[in-house]
């Protein structure tokens, strides 16, 4: 899930991005570079029996999370067949006629980000052309979670009719990523120098939405259009599966767009806004965007992992002190998610009854 921004071009050539949470970012140019490197972290140690191994990988994650807010995970142990199946299902879904996809239009589910977000329905940066992508989102479902505490809790997702195997294919991968994320929540606790089990209570009933995205090749310039405009994610962290087309870009410390080049079999993990708030800005929730200039279609599948909606979004003890007091007001995760979801969905220019409305 992402957030609306506006961009203005200053006389210096610098661009200013104002996120709708009020944060302002400046960048030098719309061109992306490979100058700054996104760290590559070997995840095999997160599953190690030895605490020293888990602590060692946690320290690497700590550094990446506070410096750039993005890292690759390699050797994560999840079989590639699950990602392959999700990419196949994405191609199948997005190839459906518009009216079939509109059966599950996101506008049908108030306050939740689930369902279909049509092609060019957002313009996150107020550029000349709408963002060139379409997406389908689905939510956590206790029935698909082997570790669920309450299996009967209903899920808010909506599903297209007559698409056998679609839901199953998506949840098979989702369940794998859920297990990885719960383990990562422990590693993040170590990374914050907290007891390893610190977040366990927060992830029993996590916020764990996922989406598939389709980006056609963009022919307009990078000054005129994005695939998905500059934004920050909402929850704690995001695990992105991308295909080989490339196009994901991260706003680096030097104020340039850094390419997150595809590394086969890897995940791109990024810190999101709830984790930034819970770490009192120790972890950085980094602005990112997608521009598909690869000459072919691009598909991706981000998994958004956050804490239980009923828990308080409050800075952890190792990130506050008398000299460094809490920066953000305390609210529940649910209140924060609803606020962000509604802000984003209000900018959707597709009206289910009237058809597509240009912004
Ligand atoms: O498609 C991607 O690689 C990333 C998409 C993204 O940033 C998002 O959906 O929040
Ligand atoms: Fe994102």
Image (cartoon, grey):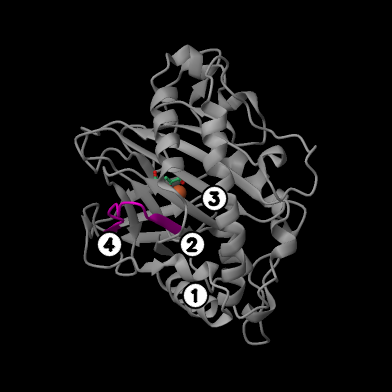
- Residue at 52%, 33% (x, y): give it: 169
- Residue occupying image coordinates x 59% and y 24%: 159
Which mark's residue is nearer the viewer, 4 or 1? 1
Q: Name the residue under label 2.
A: 285
Percent x, y for residue 218?
25, 34
**Which numbered marker is on residue 62?**
1
Q: Does the magenta stretch include residue 187?
A: no
Quadrant of res 16: bottom left
Q: Residue furthest front?
A: 49
Q: Image point 36% across, 32% down: which residue?
A: 130
Q: Is residue 70 above or below residue 121?
A: below
Q: Residue at x 72, y 60 (%)?
A: 202
Marks 3 and 1, Cα distance to the nearest angstrom?
20 Å
* Label 1 residue SS: helix
Q: Which of 89 and 191 is in front in this view?
A: 89
335 or 154: which is nearer to us? 154
Camera-nearest label, 3 or 4: 3
Q: Give the range drawn in magenta.
A: 258-269
Name the image quarter holding the C terminus: top left
Please say if the residues under marks 3 and 4 sit with CB atoms less than 8 Å apart.
no
Instruction: Read off the residue under disc 3.
Output: 177
Nearest to the eye among marks 1 and 2: give it: 1
Task: Give coordinates of residue 220: x percent, y percent.
Answer: 22, 34
- Label 4: which residue? 256
Query: What's the distance in space between the residues labelled 1 and 2, CA to CA?
Result: 13 Å
Q: Does the magenta stretch include residue 263?
A: yes
């Amino acid at each position: 899930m992402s957030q609306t921004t506006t961009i203005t071009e200053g006389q210096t050539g610098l661009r200013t991005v104002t996120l709708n949470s009020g944060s302002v970012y400046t960048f030098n140019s719309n061109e992306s570079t490979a100058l700054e490197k996104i760290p590559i972290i070997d995840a095999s140690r997160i599953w190690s029996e030895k605490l020293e191994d888990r602590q060692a990988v946690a320290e690497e994650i700590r550094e990446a999370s506070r410096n750039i807010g993005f890292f690759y995970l390699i050797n994560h142990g999840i079989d590639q067949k699950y990602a392959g199946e999700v990419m196949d299902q994405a191609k199948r879904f997005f190839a459906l006629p518009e009216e079939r996809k509109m059966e599950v239009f996101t506008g049908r589910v108030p306050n939740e980000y689930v369902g279909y977000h049509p092609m060019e329905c957002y313009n996150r940066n107020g550029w000349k052309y709408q963002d060139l992508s379409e997406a389908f989102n689905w939510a956590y479902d206790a029935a698909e979670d082997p570790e669920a505490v309450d299996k009967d809790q209903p899920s808010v997702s909506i599903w297209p009719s007559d698409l056998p195997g679609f839901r199953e294919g998506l949840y098979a991968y989702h369940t794998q990523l859920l297990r990885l994320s719960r383990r990562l929540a422990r590693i993040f606790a170590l990374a914050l120098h907290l007891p390893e089990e610190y977040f366990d209570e927060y992830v029993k009933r996590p916020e764990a939405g996922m989406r598939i995205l389709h980006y056609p090749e963009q022919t307009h310039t990078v000054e005129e259009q994005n695939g998905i405009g500059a934004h920050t994610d909402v929850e704690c962290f995001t695990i992105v599966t991308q295909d080989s087309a490339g196009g994901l870009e991260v706003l680096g410390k030097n104020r340039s767009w850094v390419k997150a080049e595809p590394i086969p079999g890897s995940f791109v993990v990024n810190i999101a806004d709830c984790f930034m708030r819970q770490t009192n800005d120790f972890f950085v929730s980094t602005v990112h965007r997608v521009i598909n200039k690869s000459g072919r279609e691009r598909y991706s599948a981000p998994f958004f992992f956050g804490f239980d909606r009923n828990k308080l979004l409050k800075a952890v003890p190792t990130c506050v002190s008398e000299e460094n007091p809490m920066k953000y007001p305390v609210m529940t995760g649910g209140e924060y998610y609803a606020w962000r979801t509604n802000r984003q969905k209000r900018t959707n220019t597709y009206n289910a009854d009237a058809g597509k409305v240009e912004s």
